[in-house]
Amino acid sequence: MADDYRTMWKELGLNLDNHDALLQVLGKMYGDIFMSQKNRPAKTDYLDFVMSEVHGLRIKELVDGKKQGRKVIGTYCTFVPEEIVLAADAVMVGLCAGADFATEEVEKYLPKNICSLIKSTLGFKLGGVCPYLESSDLVVGENTCDGKKKAYEVFKNFVNEMYVMDLPQMKQNGAKGLLRKEYDKFKTKIEQVTGKTITAESLKKAITIVNAKRSAIHRLCKIRTANMEPISGLDSLLINQIFFYEDPLRFTQKINELCDELEARVSSRQGAFPENTPRILMSGCPMAVPNWKLPAIIETSGAVIVGEESCVGERGTRNLVDNSGKTMDSLMDALVNRYLDIDCAIFTPNTDRLDHIGEMAKTYSADGVILYSIQFCTPYTVEAMGIEKDLEKQGVPAIRIETDYSQEDVGQLTTRVQAFIERIKG
Amino acid sequence: MISAGIDIGSRTVKTALVDGSSIVKLDVADATSSPLEAARVMLKALPACPVAVTGYGRDLLDAIGSFPTITEIKAHALGARFLQGDCTGVIDVGGQDIKVISLDEEGRVKRFEMNDRCAAGSGRFLEIMADRLGFSLEDFGNAALSGQNEVIISSMCTVFAESEVVGLLNKNVERRDIAAALHRSIVKRIVSMYNRASPVSACIVATGGGAKNPALVAFLTKALGANIVALPQGQSAGAIGCAVYAARLKEINAA
């Protein structure tokens, strides 16, 4: 089996030495951070399986699908509608951007002071270590922040085919019209890449599939509002992370099975943490696999993360698409309506986000909010300053943490997080 | 009740032995190269009593026993209140961290600010700069107090600031004026952290090794318009706070 994978990786053009090194680090990190957790629900074995096969079985599925003509579309943002990709019988995967790799190489093309997520995107390409990227027939970028926008100009020189989607930056003044035009163009592009025609019927079916996937997450969110936590924040984050590349049907089924177990655990008050553990809401930048540094610090410092206000979390999965329309036009409008509600910090003004954080803090009975930003991420670091003040004014303890993918600040981060938890406990 | 605290910092280990509301004994030892060894020796010198640990190396003692730990933030808050019952805030200039803590009426941590990975402007910065200018750490602050106001150093990064210092020395600028400029640049950084933590300015206790520096305290007082209290035991505030915590924990567990 392992040999088969090596052949597959080689055929995909991965750098096997680099890739071995990455898998070794990833495996060790997963063991240290996830397998060491106490009182994990039994059904988290699905997560362990997915992670153990993250570059194996899942890639094989993609490669096998490609042989049958099923194209792979790689993406980096929650604004790219998976429904359109699925409607053309293609597969959408979120691409790797959660760890430092080949940083010296990256800095030949990008400035030093650009966020870790963007550096990682190029690093995984230059290092030849992301089989998802190498499987992708089309890589989709999007005009979100300036950093990503400009980095895609560099990135496009390294990938087979790159497509950049424009996004509105304000939500009034014809934003819906603009996004609709972009989604129409994207649909045409996907039809061209796949050679398949998207029909109202296939789109409706795709919407049903993605709605079901989001509904499974909504169910998990609801369980986590209970006044005890049957599952850790780390495992919940991981669920939100694999949401981006796992097979959608299997994901939905497995997460619902896990939720069955979690509901039973809530009834029998079987927590992953002792009762009255301080509850933390995380809010801010997306956390891609294996960006687990801060959540691991929080949950080994005597607190539990009860929610993620993040694109890899509730901001990305909130709201379903209205699937009642019968025509292509009405379904495309329904997509636009759902996606334009995402309150990403690239929008101005973005007051909905502040309201959502306040609501989430209440719904999840959070004792404090940790505002997480990746260093050099202007949209989220700027918003964090105002949000922190606003939350404190509402009586919700808040702290801003800015960090990157390196490990050098773990000592100081731990002190700050622990001091914040001490403060919450009083 | 007798209780003790250990503060394992990046530059020194501090211990405090406390009996109720009075200090029995304070100790400070260098810990740059082997903090565990220094802590072990100092721990042995303490009588059998409840002990709590703080500081950058607070988990180091796991190797020799099980001790409750608290962060430096909480330790300095407790220690400052012990030393100065009405204090409203703390400015701690430690070896590699600067912290500003705002306290509520009961002395609990209301807000805090702390530098992240970079030790710019911390105690270690002062040491290196004093050395570069040929001052002992003790003379450095006094020299700065007598220095003029005209020189400005804009960098707080140790490497960049050192280049600036070299440049100034080669322009034949007085050492004490450079010393004053270095202190003012640190104060600028602390002021911005202070404004974010925004403690009530009535009584701010200076702790950490920085509390021993007269120029830092004088410049801070002027820049903040706050009442800054630098006590001789300021450097041991973290260890004292731990002793207070250890005693409280003992009482809670006994109840």
Image (cartoon, coloured by chain):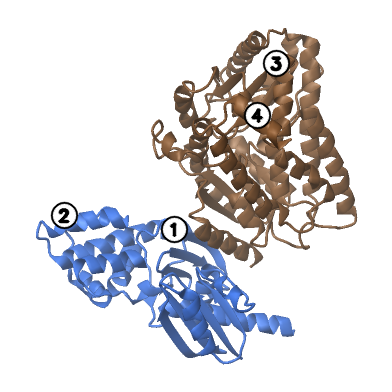
Q: Which residue is mark 4?
A: A7
Instruction: Name the kind of residue labelled 1 in the image.
Output: Asn
Asked if marks 3 and 2 fall on the same chain, the answer is no
Instruction: Name the kind of residue labelled 4 in the image.
Output: Thr
Residue A301: x percent and y percent? 64, 61
Spatial separation of the CA atoms under disc 4 and disc 1: 48 Å
Asked if marks 4 and 2 fall on the same chain, the answer is no
Spatial separation of the CA atoms under disc 4 and disc 2: 59 Å
Label 3 CA crowd tier, 10 Å (few <14, some 14–19, many 20+) = some
Q: Which residue is mark 1?
A: B115
Quadrant of the image containing the C terminus of chain A: bottom right
- Disc nearer the start of the sequence (3/4): 4
Q: Which residue is mark 2?
A: B167
Q: Chain letter of disc 2?
A: B
Tell me the shade of chain A.
brown
Q: Residue at x 79, y 55 (%)?
A: A227
- Camera-near label (2 vs 1) is 2
Instruction: Name the kind of residue labelled 3 in the image.
Output: Asp
- Camera-near label (4 vs 1) is 4
Q: Which residue is mark 3?
A: A333
Spatial separation of the CA atoms under disc 2 and disc 1: 27 Å
Q: Which element is circle 1 on?
A: loop
Q: Which element is circle 2 on?
A: helix
Q: Which element is circle 4 on?
A: helix
